[in-house]
Amino acid sequence: MSLIRIKDATDPATWGPAIDEAVHTISRGELVVLPTDTVYGVAADAFNPDAVQALLDAKGRGRQAPPPVLMPDVRTLDGLATDVPDAARDLAEAFWPGGLTLILPAQPSLAWDLGETHGTVALRVPDHRVALALLRRTGPLAVSSANLTGQPAGVTVAEAYEQLGSSVPVFLDGGQAPGQVASTIVDATSPTLKLVRAGAITLAELREVAPVEDPAEPAAGERER
């Protein structure tokens, strides 16, 4: 393992140089691996199409599977998405930072290319101090799990390095990722919210805040038969 590229980011009192180097790396259009509240992720400047393509290439992933975008704060929501349903705002206020990803219509004025998004963007505010420290410096980042497509996501920097070491200049070591469950994904591209993937936040927890349909559940009429 190359310790040169793995930077200690376990202590806020000493992680300044590591975060600085990660910020500079992102600004050059290169990739950074960072811990999140779910698993380790590989990040690129969301507004740099070449950097996003490098992320997809590093994972062996096609443009038909665009990466989500991590944000530093819920207040960034309206800068990246449009036509946000009130129910989606309620979920964002309740569960961000945290393990909730919202799929929303992307702001049409934004100059980015995340892949075949069909005019949408998947947004999340992670609940991890290293990720947030970086995002506050860089702004929104395209982030996908730090693994080769089809392989288990890394929950330690060593696991991430083993899979992506040749393609990423900087790895931020924040210790073991605290949550090994993927984020819950909700499609909020229409007023009726739909569960896309169950994960860190349960459907019951979502429904305590807003009505969310589960396509896997039978319709009300079917249940009555």
Image: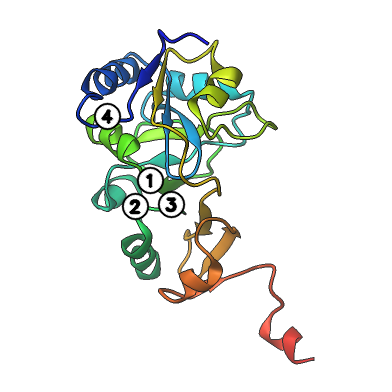
Q: Amino acid at mark 3?
A: Pro
N-term-proximal mark, 3 vs 4: 3
In the rendered image of this protein, does residue 214 appear above or below residue 134?
below
Tell me residue 173's x, y (percent). 40, 25
3D distance between C-alphas at marks 2 and 3: 20 Å
Label 4's element? helix
Q: In the figure, residue 59 lies in which quadrant?
A: top right
User: What residue is pinned by disc 4?
Assistant: 138
**Label 3 crowd bin: few (<14), some (14–19), many (20+), radius 10 Å:** many
Alpha carbon separation for disc pair 1 and 2: 5 Å
Alpha-carbon neighbours of circle 2 within 10 Å: few (<14), some, or many (≥20)? some
Real-space CA distance between mark 4 and mark 2, rounded to the nearest whole angstrom: 17 Å
Helix, strand or loop at label 2? It is: loop
Residue occupied by mark 2: 97
**Mark 3 touches mark 4? (CB < 8 Å):** no
Q: Residue at x 50, y 61 (%)?
A: 201
Callout 1: SS: loop
Which mark lies nearer to you, 2 or 3?
2
Q: Residue at x 43, y 44 (%)?
A: 37
Residue at mark 1 to residue at mark 4: CA–CA distance: 14 Å
Residue drawn where x is 34% and y is 68% of the image = 90
Residue type, numbered disc 1: Pro
Residue under pointer 3: 105
Which tag, 2 or 3, sits closer to the chain's start? 2
Of badges 4 and 2, nearer the viewer stands: 2
Residue 162 in sight from this viewpoint: yes
Residue 204 versus residue 135 in the image, above or below: below
Q: Is residue 196 left or right of residue 20?
A: right
**Three-letter residue code for mark 2:** Pro
